[in-house]
Image: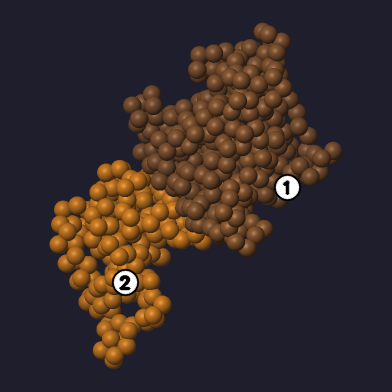
Chain colours: A orange, B brown
Amino acid sequence: MTESDYIARWVAPGARVLDLGCGDGSLLKHLWRARQAPGYGVEFDDAHVLACIRNDVNVLQMNLEDGLSAFRDGSFDCVILSETLQAIHHTEALMREMLRVGREVIVSFPNFGHWQARLQVALGRMPVSTELPYRWYDTPNVHLCTLADFEDFCRGLGVTILERLVLRNGVPVGTLPNLLGRYALYRCARG
Amino acid sequence: MIVEAKKARFTEPLKLKGGAELPGFEIAYETYGELNAARSNAVLVCHALNASHHVAGSYAADPENIGWWDNLVGPGKPLDTNKFFVVGNNYIGSCFGSTGPASVNPATGRPWGADFPVVTVEDWVAAQARLADHLGIERFAAVIGGSLGAMQALQWALSFPERIRHALVIAATPRLSAQNIAFNEVARQAIMTDPDFHGGHYYEHGVVPRRGLRIARMIGHITYLSDDAMMEKFGRVLRDKTAPGFDFDIDFEIESYLRYQGDKFASYFDANTYLRITKALDYYDPAAEYGGDLARALARAKAQFLVVSFTSDWRFASSRSREIVKALLDNRGIVSYLEIDAPHGHDAFLMDDPRYHGALAAYFANIAL
């Protein structure tokens, strides 16, 4: 199963979806096909916006760092921030905005606590891996975190974690998730 | 592409928003491509201030006269006439073929002049719907326009929600700002205070208020370009001299450019038309009858929208387009929004920036017929 499949399982059929940092719109297209969930993507990059239009996905070219003022309170069943959290500057403000406009929030990100990342740091190097393919000087990532960090963050914001899924090479991880998981997906709601 | 201008005559009076009635009228139009058997591939192109029904191609007898949106419309172009039946139209009140102030008033046998009623965006759309009837088009696959043309595309979705599937609203605003109206008023004052204006009845005096029109165009032109684009194009470069003249002749290139644009415009555009178009712009405000609530005003729209703005456009800034997008989102409408980081200012909607035209091409390609 792909990450999109896992996310689709958390999206109710027909749910209204907002996908922040939607890339080429393939997740939205997948959610439409798998769950008949209509939605909008928000994307800043010109090439991605064009790809969304080619994919026949509703896309809004806006900067997430400016907040979500285009959207009314509670206007979505589900707001998704997939593989984008780590590249956001105003992380806390955006998380509050997501919880304002959406009933539920799905966040996914690469786990910086994976043992390989820890080992590379212990050996004196910034981690590079499949999930973290960038080198320290060309990375768009500014706020990398571990599972434990994210859960603390949610607690601080009064966010309830409804479900958590930790993956290693696309397969769920049961034991020692913060050490063995490469990738984390969370389904959250206001506390 | 060789094209031909046509005219459609409508004998039934048109009741105007301002209360007056137009006793029959003509619309000049052109068509490109073929209407398919299902009549599902028609696209209406609406023009802005000084353009016309001549959207694309050129005339057999006048090959130099190329349509104003020829970079967008034609075979294999983003709005592909191999797929779509594209209709260019000239709005009423214009001076390029549709009934306007220079036309003969049937009640007097003389040109309407100042007596031609003030027409609005809503009136234009109502007249265009008659043209659609005339062409056998029940429902447009899309209506597209930039600037004032975008107001018409938006209004189509409000006046005839069942007759438009897609609205492409480019470089738009849902209503003019006080500053926008202020610029229009300066332009109108330039025209109306010209001694050759004669209260709008200058045709019968055999003159045109050329000086006023010229200044009106110069003012307008400044608002179409961004500060950066103007600086890049003209800078502070002197015109045919190495030092300032310390007189009131042309010193800078920008002065020469504005005078040239003003002269060119005054040689072909009608002052009474200019007055009416700027009023149509000023008056357009679909939210007005909903206490200023644009979301409520757009609630009846059923079309899918593509809204495009340009970051360097200060006449109708991106924030104005975002108001339209927000109002559509509030209604759970289907909308995509592009904010193109182009340097050309308001005029960017006429350019062929690859991001802009690429998106339009992709959008049109996805419209099912």
Q: Secondary structure at mark 2?
A: loop
Q: Nearer the viewer, residue A32 or B190?
A: B190
x and y, in percent, of residue B90 in the image? 65, 30
Q: Would you say A82 lies left or right of B83 here?
A: left
Mark 2 Cα shell of 10 Å, populated few (<14), some (14-19), many (≥20)? few
Distance, label 2 to label 1, CA atoms, is 47 Å
Q: The residue marked by circle 2 belongs to what chain? A: A
Residue A98 against residue A88 in the figure, above or below: above
Name the residue: 23% across, 71% down: A147
Q: Secondary structure at mark 1?
A: loop
Kindly give the residue lying farthest to the front in the view shown. B246
Q: Would you say B214 lies left or right of B267 here?
A: left
Q: Nearer the viewer, residue A144 or B291?
A: B291
Name the residue: 35% across, 62% down: A82
Evaluate whether residue B341 shows in this view: yes
Q: Amino acid at mark 2?
A: Val
Quadrant containing the N terminus of chain A is: bottom left
Tell me the quarter of the picture where residue B91 sits.
top right
Q: Amino acid at mark 1?
A: Pro
- The residue carrying mark 2 is A142
- The residue carrying mark 1 is B75
